[in-house]
Each structure stands twice: as C-alpha cells, then as structure tokens.
Image (spheres, helix red, strand yellow):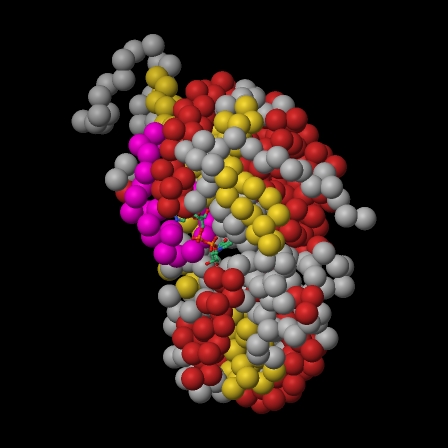
Amino acid sequence: MTEAIPTNFQLLINGRFVDGSAGFSSVINPSTGKAFAQSPDASEDQVAEAIWAAREAQPKWGMQSPLQRAVIMRQIARLIRRDAEQLATVLVMEQGKPINEARGEVAEAAEFFDYFAEFARRIQGEILPSDFPGEQIWIQRVPVGVVVAILPWNYPCGLVSRKVAPALIAGNTIVIKPHEETPLTALMMMRLFVEAGVPDGVVNVVSGAGETVGAALVGRNDVDLITMTGSVATGKRIMSSAAGHLTPVSLELGGKAPFIVMDDADMEHAVAAAVTSRYMNCGQVCVCNERTLVHRSRYDEFVERFIAMTRTLTVGDPMKTTTDIGPKISSRERDKVEKMLAKAVADGAEIAFGGGRPQSKDLADGFFINPTVLTNVTPDMDIMTDEIFGPIVPIMPFDTFEEAVAISNNSRFGLSAYLFTNDFNKIMAAVSDVSFGEIYVNRSAGELLQAYHVGYRDSGPGGDDGVHGLDKYLRKKTVYVNYSGKPTAGLMPFR
Ligand code: NAD
C-alpha cells in the first residue's frame, strides 16, 4: 500500500509553521524526473528570525535537566517510528534510494534520539586539585548555544537526527537547512518535533538554496557552532565564511575509500561486502567503496565474482522491495558520473561490465545509470582519485600489502578504508599505517552510532556520533572555587 504523503510543506520558525517568504521550489522525483511537491524557500529575514528564535529559546532549554530533554527525545523517537512508513515513502520520492534502504534510514533516524537520550545522566565534567589549599578547579561541560546544521541530499532524514539529537541533549538550540533537492523529510520531521513537545524556537528549519539560505546562515556573527555534511568545495566555502567570526565549524565531507582485498581473504564475504559497499544508495555514500584494490593472485577470480554478483542486482523503481539500485539524485549528478566514466575510458580504463543507462522505457525519464565495473585502471587516473558518488567501481590489482597501503594513502581524502584479510599482522599493520579516520576490517560499509565517524585531510575537520561526536555540541567552562575562607594568595603560591 502506498502511503498518503503530505501536500503542504512549511518552514518551522519559533514554533510556528510558516510559508517561505522567498517563494517555493519544485522537488523532483529522481525516478521520474518530474516535480511532485513544492518546498518553501526562506528569505534572509526568515533566516534571521530563526536564529533569533533559537537564541531566545536556548537559555531556558539549556537550564532544563537533561532528563527532561531526554523525555522529549524519546517521544520524538516514538513518533518517527509511528510515521516511519510515510517518512520512508517521501524519502524514496525525494531522494530515490530503494525503499528497503529508506526504511533503514528512518529506523536509524529514530535510533539517534534514543541513543543520545541515554546521555542525560552521562554529560560529565572534571574536578582537579588546585595549587592552593582550600580550592578546587571544576571543568564543566556546558551547551555551545545556537547550532546551525547544513545537510546534504544523500541521507536527508537520518542526518537531521544525527545533528538534532546530540544538539538537544547537550542543551543547545538548532537551525537546520536541508539540501534544496531533498527538503521534505526534514520538513515532515519538524511536525513530529513539535508534537513531541519541543519548545518554541528550540528546533527551527529554513529550507532553500545553499547560495542564499545556506550562505546567510553561515555568515552570521551570532551562531556558536556550524556543523555541515556535504562536499569539499562547500565545506571550504563555509569554513572561510565562518572564519570571519571565528565560529567553530565541524565538517564531514567527501571520501574516496580504498577497499583492499588480500590474497588470504574470504572471497565470498569480500565480494559481497565490496558489492554492497559500492552500490548502496546508488553509490552515493561518503563511505562507499570507491576504488577496489585486489591482490594480483586473486584478481581475476575477484573480478569474475564481483561481476557475477553485480549482474544479479536490479536497477529499477525504488518503491519496489525487489530493487537494489535506484536513480542518481539528479540529472546534474548523473551527467557528472557519466563524464567521469567517459574520461576513465579515454584514459585507458576498460568497461568489464555495465556502462550506459538502463534500456527499460519505465525508467527512461529517471536519472538511472547502470552499475559498471572498470578494469585496466591505474592509481593516477581521475576515476581513482576523485569521488565518483555513483554505481561505478574501478578494480585494480596490486602485488604487495605495502603497495596497497601506499596507493590507499596517496589521496586527498581520508574518511573510510576497508581491508579484507585473516592475517592478524596485516590487520595490525593496516590499523597503524592506513591514514584514514575509519577502518573497516572484514566487513561492509555502515558506521554505528556509538562509534565516531571522522575523516582526515579533505574529508573534513569534524566528526559525528558517539561520545566524541556529542563533545562537539558542548563547550567547557573552568571554575576555580576557593572555599578556604581566605582570599587565594596569588598566581605563584609557593614563592
Ligand atoms: P553540497 O556541498 O552540494 O551541499 C551540502 C549543503 O551545503 C546543502 O544543504 C547546500 O545547500 C549547502 N550549501 C551549498 N552552498 C553553500 C554555501 N555557500 N553556504 C552554506 N551552505 C551551502 O553537498 P551534497 O552534494 O549535498 O553532498 C554530497 C557530498 O557530501 C559528498 O561529497 C559526500 O561524500 C558528502 N557526505 C559526507 C558525509 C560524511 O559523513 N563525511 C556524509 C554524507 C555526505
């Protein structure tokens, strides 16, 4: 049964649902290429109102006991689960991922609230002895204040929770800007936040283009933290804009994950993991297997099995539970990937499987692209150095573990890396020598919310999830408490 979807999408500013003063933009279904909803565009004044509302609401929200905040967060989790099917349906329509994956994303969106609610009794400080008798030093963790969150299009529902949940338990208020191509699930979630009892101004959403709404948000001098997930180019723009006000920035940017398969690897599992890690969400995940490196002694076998498994995948209508690969998010993104493929072939890569677009008439208007396997690639080709973000995988052989590590590390990206081997020494050597923020050993993609999703180099100075992710939403306050009854002697107690 298809879920009925809402017809009226509005901004949430200071607890009120309002239209965008800058008008509306069409939201395109990437499976059909057709507009199916209108999303509100916020004006610069509305951006200012949202920040003002967040600023006004923060002291009271921050003063509540974290346990009170956690009660509301658990209610949000319940409401997301209640409306999961409707959210998943709209997610498929706006983003194009297969419904099974959309259901997983919505489930995780709920999970973030339950998980971060657990920190209600766990935000800890420190007490240190002073150099002076009768004095203690307290280091407390306090809310940062007003958070701005800028979101990408690949996980438009899950990432709302990934930013809002830690911000709320920490006692912050937040203004969110979803991506202009996928604003709808974020806007729907606002209704659930209000229903759950989130006070006015604590969570606000302003949708619209990056160059207008996004730039207005990150250029302000009254924001305490900017957290952004998206492309490297935009991340750099945001960081330089924030530098003008010394606003702290947390950036989670692109990736170019190497997937290393050693000669002793369990091939069945390695191939299955390499396939999943490449094609999930049509290859549009920052942790995706972007370049597969296979020991030469097993290379032919690996490529053959990888192609055999790829052949079994269904590209098609993402609303069907039998679909494995949906469309790319937009024609612009599909063109980008097709150009990368053409350039790789011009550079000497061979298409060992796939290429082109699906032939089915039903898919002709959507932004579909066939899963494609490339061989005869070299590490210096653009297809091996630039983020593809689509269902295309270059596979190349290597001779030694050291060579695979060197190829992996020779990248401006440093988010996720994979290794398949049962050799304990190789695992430990990889942990030490692979210069990436996240290493998956003998498993496929998918970070967990209690860990820490963090990248090096161009993958961005930032990180979300777990206790370290939460720490970004807190700042420290140092308090010297003299209880001796006498004034503290001075800076140099023993002179
Ligand atoms: P994008 O940079 O195009 O857009 C991200 C957001 O920035 C959007 O909301 C956009 O409107 C906004 N924006 C654009 N210009 C702006 C400006 N001048 N000022 C303020 N905001 C502005 O990224 P995208 O294409 O949506 O996302 C894809 C990228 O995100 C990929 O590179 C992917 O690897 C990366 N990503 C990283 C992670 C991670 O955790 N590291 C997770 C998901 C996606």
**Residue at point 43% right, 78% down?**
343
Q: Which residues are magenta?
A: 219-242
User: Residue drawn at (70%, 34%), measured in percent from left and top?
Assistant: 79
* Image coordinates for residue 342, horizontal then vertical, percent: 46, 78
Q: Is residue 413 magenta?
A: no
Report the front residue among 127 and 266: 266
Q: How many marks?
A: 0
Position of the C terminus, as image quadrant, is top left
Residue 36 or 3: which is nearer the viewer?
36
Asked if one can make out residue 137 in the rendered structure from this viewpoint, the answer is no
- Give coordinates of residue 486: x percent, y percent: 30, 11
Residue in the picture at 81% in, 48% down: 1
Q: Tell whether 116 sits left or right of 431.
A: right
Compared to 372, does 448 lie above or below? above
Residue farthest right in this picture: 1
Residue 282 location (% of width, % of height): 60, 64
The verdict on residue 231 being magenta is yes
Does residue 348 appear in the picture of this structure? yes
Residue drawn 61% across and 63% down? 365
User: Could you say which is closer to the camera, residue 393 or residue 470?
Assistant: 393
Q: Is residue 302 left or right of residue 19?
A: right
Image coords of residue 324 (percent x, y): 69, 65
Residue sticking out furthest to the top: 485
